Image (cartoon, helix red, strand yellow):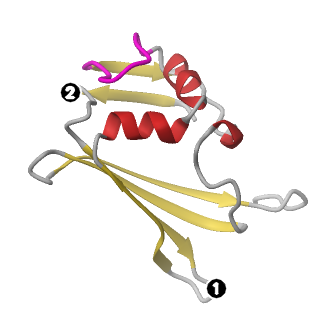
Amino acid sequence: MKGNITLLKPYDDNLTLDMNVSTWGSTGGWIPNHYILIRKKACSSLRNLYGNAWFTLLNAFNVPTDRCPIPVGTYITSGYELTKFEDMNLPKVSFYGKYKVVGRIKNVENKDVCCIVVETNFIRPWETLI
């Protein structure tokens, strides 16, 4: 993963983390609610989910602290390897296939302050993407 993240407000525990994972159906179309995660205290929850990979992630984006809250600023990475799932506190087993993650960060009024959509493919070791 390469890119940047700009925080206009601190990423802290006053926010809520809301993620919904969809799978691609065998007859086409996204099937929502494969995995749902809603957690208060967004910063601490994300830190817990990332486990030991939290420190690698923050280091890759040059974040000045490894504690919550993450301060306002623009954080840039020239590259972060997403294959270290064993270091994260996420499910370790998943079916091969196409997934879409819709992540939202909500404030205390339950209004969206951030949204991210990521699509990914889990392929068998002998398969290649075209």
- Give the percent coordinates (x, y) of residue 44: 37, 34
Mark 2, residue position: 8
User: Closer to the camera, 28 or 16?
Assistant: 16
Q: Quadrant of residue 76?
A: top left
Q: Residues within 10 Å of mark 2 (few under 14, many from 20)?
A: few
State the mark number for residue 26. Answer: 1
**Residue found 44% across the figure and 17% down from its top:** 66
**Residue found 58% across the figure and 49% down from its top:** 90
- Give the percent coordinates (x, y) of residue 50: 53, 37
What predominant SS class does the magenta segment belong to?
A: loop
Asked if the residues shown at circle 2 and circle 1 are in contact, with their CB atoms under 8 angstroms apart, the answer is no
The quadrant the C terminus occupies is bottom right
Secondary structure type for disc 1: loop
Given the image, on which type of amino acid does mark 2 rest? Leu
User: What whole-number distance in Å separates the C-alpha atoms at marks 2 and 1?
Assistant: 40 Å
- Give the percent coordinates (x, y) of residue 56: 59, 23
In magenta segment, residue 71: yes
- Give the percent coordinates (x, y) of residue 49: 50, 42
Q: Tell me which segment is drawn in magenta.
A: 63-72
In magenta segment, residue 22: no
